[in-house]
Image (spheres, grey):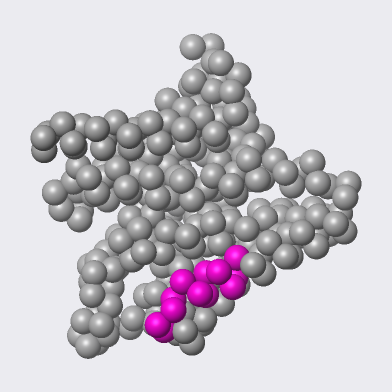
Amino acid sequence: MEILTVDFFQRALAGGLLIGITAPLIGIFLVLRRLSMIGDTLAHVTIAGVALGFLINVYPIAVGLVFAIVASFAIEKLRKAYRGYAELSIAIIMSGGVALASLFFTLGMGYNTDVVSYLFGSIYTLDTTDLYVVGAVTVIVVIGISVFFKEFFLLTFEEDAAAVSGLPVKWLNLLITVMTALVISTAIKIVGALLVSALITIPAACSLFIARSFKSSVIFSVVIAEIAVVVGLMVAGIWNLAPGATIVLLLIAMLILTLLAKRGFTA
């Protein structure tokens, strides 16, 4: 267990544990609202921001975060414009994100190696600034969900009833979308843009099979994510594997075991 004493691994573990809180907290609401693909969409937009950050020599995660927040506003605007086709807004923004990322890749050929690390994750390269950013986002998300938990609950299961009851549905939708953007923009350096949606959706998918209430499903999703992060990092560190991929594959294995156990109990 010597790896636990190494600075870069301690930073990786700290960053992973923080994302292990925020990603499933947001994920449970997105999954139940059938907005799972928003993770991939904002991840692609964030990569475009990261590529621009390298191109103009500005802190990449900060630029990616700005891109993700702007994209979250655009998604909400398009969701209202295409009320009957909400998923269309996700497809439009994803297309724009991929196009911008491709353009910035072409303009900054010398930075492509650095940007690619954000596609697959580079948790071992987290520095103190990264941890401060991830920590700040964690505080924002935890406080936001704690304060508006009942409102988000009603919004998730009955948006029309929430509007009739006088809740500011527009602002609540925007708040949860912006928090999603914050989580994804900080998570891509940990698990990578191509894998970040797995950390958002799979813990939620597991918890929904075993939880008996909404509140317990939120708790279970966080616990499952944290187990996957800790065990995944340990396995990846000991066996010299890709940490992001190891965490995601472990989550998939946990989902399969959950499904098999559920089938066994109901058989």
Q: Is 127 located above or below residue 216 in the figure?
A: above
Residue 141 falls in image quadrant: bottom left
The residue at the point 20 percent across, 55 percent down is 214
The residue at the point 29 percent across, 31 percent down is 257
Q: Decide if residue 43 is on the left or right side of residue 1.
A: right
Is 107 magenta? The answer is no
Q: Position of residue 153 (x, y in %)?
A: 24, 66
Q: Is 88 located above or below residue 62 in the figure?
A: below
Q: Position of residue 49 (x, y in %)?
A: 70, 60
The furthest residue to the front = 267
The residue at the point 49 percent across, 62 percent down is 38
Characterize the magenta stretch by its predominant secondary structure: helix
Q: Position of residue 215 (x, y in %)?
A: 20, 53
Q: Decide if residue 245 is on the left or right side of residue 103.
A: left
Q: Quadrant of the C terminus?
A: top left
Looking at the rendering, the stretch of residues picked out in magenta corresponds to 83-94
Label count reads 0
Do we see residue 28 in this rendering?
yes
Q: Position of residue 92 (x, y in %)?
A: 59, 73
**Which of these two is toward me, 209 or 132?**
209
Residue 71 falls in image quadrant: bottom right
Do we see residue 219 in this rendering?
no
**Which of these two is toward me, 7 or 90?**
90
The residue at the point 56 percent across, 16 percent down is 239
**Which of these two is toward me, 51 or 8?**
51
The furthest residue to the top = 2
**Which of these two is toward me, 36 or 162?**
36
Is 91 magenta? The answer is yes
